[in-house]
Amino acid sequence: MMKIYLLFRLPAIATLIAYLFLRNNSDARWEYDLVLFNLVALLAALSIALSPILDDPLGRAGVIGAIISWSAGSITSSLDSFFEINTPLDLDLIAQSFYALFYPLAIFGLTRAIRFKTVSKSLELLDTSIIAIGYTTILTALLVRPAMTTIDGSIFDVFLAILYPVGDIVILVLVLLLVLRQRISWRNGLILSGATMFFLSDFYFLYQSYLGEYEFGSLTDIGWLISFMLLAEAFWFANNEEQAPRNFNPAVATIALLGSSTLLAIAVLQPSYLPRFLILPAFITIALSFLRMGVAINDARNMSNEQILARTDELTGLANRRKFMVDCQEFLKNPGSLLILDLDGFKAVNDSLGHGVGDQLLKQVANRFQRLMPSDGLLARLGGDEFGALIPGVDGIEVARALKATLTYPFHINSNEIHLDVSIGEARNDPGSSAIEQLLRRADEAMYEAKRSKLGVVSWRNQLGTSGSRL
């Protein structure tokens, strides 16, 4: 890893040092400010792409795209400054568009880079998009009215004048909040440092531009490069996978939805109050919120289905052993009977008629048993041809006898008449005096006594195992 690190990280550092040395001893030149300056940023993006650390590929792609987009804006701006290029395209407009694209890509990429390994990647993507687009739109709307009266130029110029500081604030605050919700790590610390450096560099540039004192190719521009190198360095450290919960508070996305809905309402009631370019991101935020709702409902349904399947016997539809053991814990708190039921003669049927018939037979047995169960009882298939039942109250033996009676008449499967019997062991639960393992062992002993003695139903007593107490 160290060799790869030296191969792809040192060129960016060396290029930055070369730029500082050459630029400090001469005026602005295209070889320095067009080539070397932007080469540092591109090498930082390459370093991120070639890092061997396993992380979220979408987050990595977002940060790489953000740096490349910013570099494309810088290259276009440099070409416009150094050369007189005759083109029908407005190079400054193209450069500003690339700079503007940096923000959504950076917000998306940095958020995912910090918030690696979430429960639902679809929800993660939608939450990030809703917060990024929604809050940027809201902040822009709050500033656009005063900006339109103080900034000369077109609506697009006003939009860019607002977008840059708003985007810087959104990135810094979002990264800071996400980092504070997690344990301190090199990766998150470097991402926060990179976001902070970009924020400071951008605000210094905007302040200098506002005063009319900014000079193209100023050495203070290296703050942007340093921020990219810090971000690139972060991707060479693994994310901490034992972190605090990282889910966004639902209220954060809700505020973005409500704010965007308010903007659309204002646009309808007062069409001239807000510029039209705010309508699209507000609509996108609302659309993503409804999409997120659908994804969340689908995830909840799938999770519910998975939970049901995890506690349901696939063949019979009864509760499975896991569900039975979980409910036993609650069952111990009140008086009742635990039954263990084992079919007699099932193995011979399974061996002679095949597993297909055996499966159908188990389904029919489960149906007969289930019809006799009290409404507050639980019947479970524990495995193979063994069943378990929890019967609250004092009617355990009566229920056991009724269950046995359901098998007195034959089953008919594929023209085969099949006769089965069942051996049932019952163990009474005295609240506070029995552990679940002890109760299961007693019911199991009673069931084997019922099978051995061919009595059908046996209730466990202290004497069982010597003389026994049989029903």
Image (cartoon, rainbow, N blue to C red):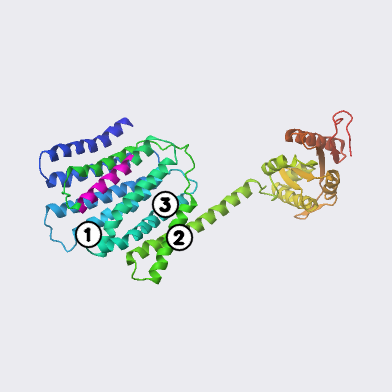
How far apart are labels 2 and 1 at the CA level?
A: 32 Å
Which of pointers 2 and 3 lies earlier in the amino acid sequence?
3
x and y, in percent, of residue 355 in the image: 70, 46
The stretch of residues the image draws in magenta is: 193-210
Check disc 2 and report the residue beneath it: 258
Residue 206 belongs to the span the image colors magenta = yes
Which of pointers 2 and 1 lies earlier in the amino acid sequence?
1
The answer to whether residue 361 shows anywhere in this view is yes
Q: Residue furthest left?
A: 26
Q: Amino acid at mark 1?
A: Leu
Check disc 3 and report the residue beneath it: 128
Q: Amino acid at mark 3?
A: Thr
Q: Main secondary structure of the magenta part?
A: helix
Q: Tag 3's secondary structure? A: helix
Q: Tag 1's secondary structure? A: helix
Please tell me which residue lies in front, 85 or 20: 20
x and y, in percent, of residue 465 in the image: 85, 29
Check disc 1 and report the residue beneath it: 93
How far apart are labels 1 and 3 at the CA level?
A: 28 Å
